[in-house]
Amino acid sequence: ARAYEGLGQCFIELREYDVAITILSRSRREPGMEDEDLIGVLYLLGYASEQGRKPRDAAAYYQRVFAIDIDFRDVSQRLKSMGKAATK
C-alpha cells in the first residue's frame, strides 16, 4: 500500500490526477487490504478526485477516511468543502 501511495503522490505532484487515481485504485485490489491499511491511499484518491473536479468521488473517499480516523490530516475540512461543492 505504501508503494502505491508514494507513486500516487508523485503523479499528484505532477498534476496527473487521472493517472494517480488509476495507480492508487490498484492498491484496493491487493488481497488482505482493509480500509485501515489504505487510509493514506483513500485520502490521496479523494485529493486526486477533488483536483480532477470529481467532487462526489472525492467526498466518498474522504468519508471513508473520516470513518477510520476523523483526525487524519485535514479530512474533515476537505469533506465539508466537498459537501458544499456537491450541492452547487
Image: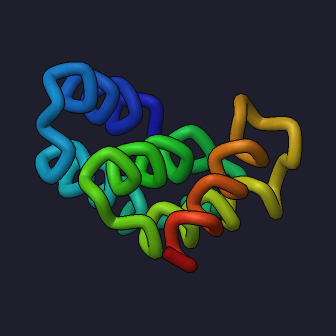
Does residue 88 lie above or below 18 as drawn?
below
Does residue 30 lie above or below 23 as drawn?
below
Percent from the top left, x then y, of residue 14?
A: 14, 22
Residue at 86 percent of width and 37 percent of height: 71
Is 35 left, or right, of 48 in this rendering?
Answer: right
Residue at 33 percent of width and 38 percent of height: 4
Residue lying furthest bottom: 87
Residue at 35 percent of width and 30 percent of height: 3
Percent from the top left, x then y, of residue 17?
A: 20, 44
Percent from the top left, x then y, of residue 33?
A: 55, 60
Q: Nearer the viewer, residue 37 or 87?
A: 87
Percent from the top left, x then y, of residue 78?
A: 64, 46
Residue 43 visible at all: yes
Residue at 49 percent of width and 75 percent of height: 88
Is 53 left, or right, of 16 in this rendering?
Answer: right
Numbered marks: total: 0
Q: Nearer the viewer, residue 37 or 60?
A: 60
Q: Nearer the viewer, residue 26 or 75?
A: 75
